[in-house]
Amino acid sequence: MLLLPPNKDDEAHKLYDFFKKKAYKIQIPAMRDKWCCNSWNGWLIAINHTFPYEICCLNPISGVQIDLPPAITFENSPPDLDETPIEFFLNKVVLSSTPSPSNANCVIMAIHSNYNKLAFCKLGDKRWITLKSEDIQYKDLLYYKDNFYAIGRSKVVQCDIGDDPRVIPFALLPKMGYFQYRYLVESSDCLLYVLRYMDLKDQEDPLKLRYETTGFKVFDLDSDKRKFSYRYETTTFKVYNFDFDQKKWKLLKNIKEKALLLGHNQAISISTKKFDGFKSNHIYFLDDYKEGYFENTYGCHDMGVFNIKTHLFKPIFHRTQLWASPLFWMRPELSLH
């Protein structure tokens, strides 16, 4: 299912089954004055817009809320919070297990701040603990076989949360281009690395100035709305499987009876035998380019279905359907009656 954001006329969220073409309206009062940064196994990770920027895990169906340490307890968080819109401060949160007040062993790992640093806490902790790292700008997180893994600039790292929390190099990554999003996915006990290639499409308006140099584009700023007028789109995907014997990534051309769900959520692999509404060897993707849909007039629009075999795309929604805030994949087995 997809969790759709509320619109201007109705504060209710909607859970949308796009195969049955049916939407279920749900009230989530606890989301008021909060920003949802991502979803994880049916839970929403939300941060408050005001000081001290409380963070919580929220189950949108049961209404259960599990509080985490506030954002001001991250290392160097006050200047970062002053300089960074709250929508950009907490970039990804992943849990080791289902949160509950009695689950003291649940560990929460986060990518945060302008620098995309790594930090963690356990349920009941008062502060976030930063991992020592020579690198910054981490891009994705995954809890896989009792360890947290994160995508760095050129390699995947393993997160050591022992007495001296730090990152440990795990595997170098395949070469990549300029404008890509990257994901880690667990699929049938395999560790997958997904590259999402994107392109910028400037608005075809002859009155707007465009300058082009090798490797860069400059777009005129819409002075009235203070937003850029360009469209971005996903152009293709590559999927790699990590070979633990040879310690390297191998390109996959077929993920067999699996489908991948990508977006503002923990990347999900599902069995198309169990969920027959999804097509095998396909990637279902949502728009998670925050810089794009917050800063240009096209809004949240880059969503679709990608056939790994044929490299062809199909839209999830009609092309004119836009949102000002992101959509989230929820667990496919989630149902409302």
Image (tube, rainbow, N blue to C red):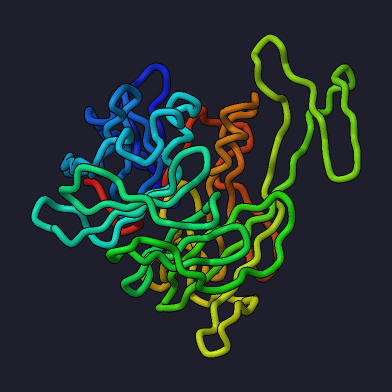
Residue 208 or 91: which is nearer the viewer?
91
The residue at the far top in this view is 224
Residue 165 or 201: which is nearer the viewer?
165
Answer yes or no: is residue 244 visible.
Answer: yes
Q: Residue at x 79, y 32 (%)?
A: 202
- Describe residue 83's horizontal placement relative to residue 210 as left or right: left
Answer yes or no: is residue 20 visible.
Answer: no
What x and y, as percent, mark residue 242?
54, 78
Q: Is residue 306 above or below residue 5?
A: below
Q: Is residue 106 above or below residue 248?
A: above
Q: Residue at x 54, y 51 (%)?
A: 136
What x and y, as percent, mark residue 198?
69, 49
Q: Is residue 277 above or below residue 51?
A: below
Q: Quadrant of the rendered structure where residue 15 is?
A: top left
The residue at the far left in this view is 102
- Describe residue 173's horizontal placement relative to residue 83 as left or right: right
What x and y, as percent, mark residue 271?
41, 71
Q: Residue at x 84, y 23 (%)?
A: 205
Q: Is residue 316 above or below residue 270?
A: above
Q: Residue at x 66, y 53 (%)?
A: 180
The residue at the far bottom in this view is 245
What x and y, as percent, mark residue 260?
50, 63
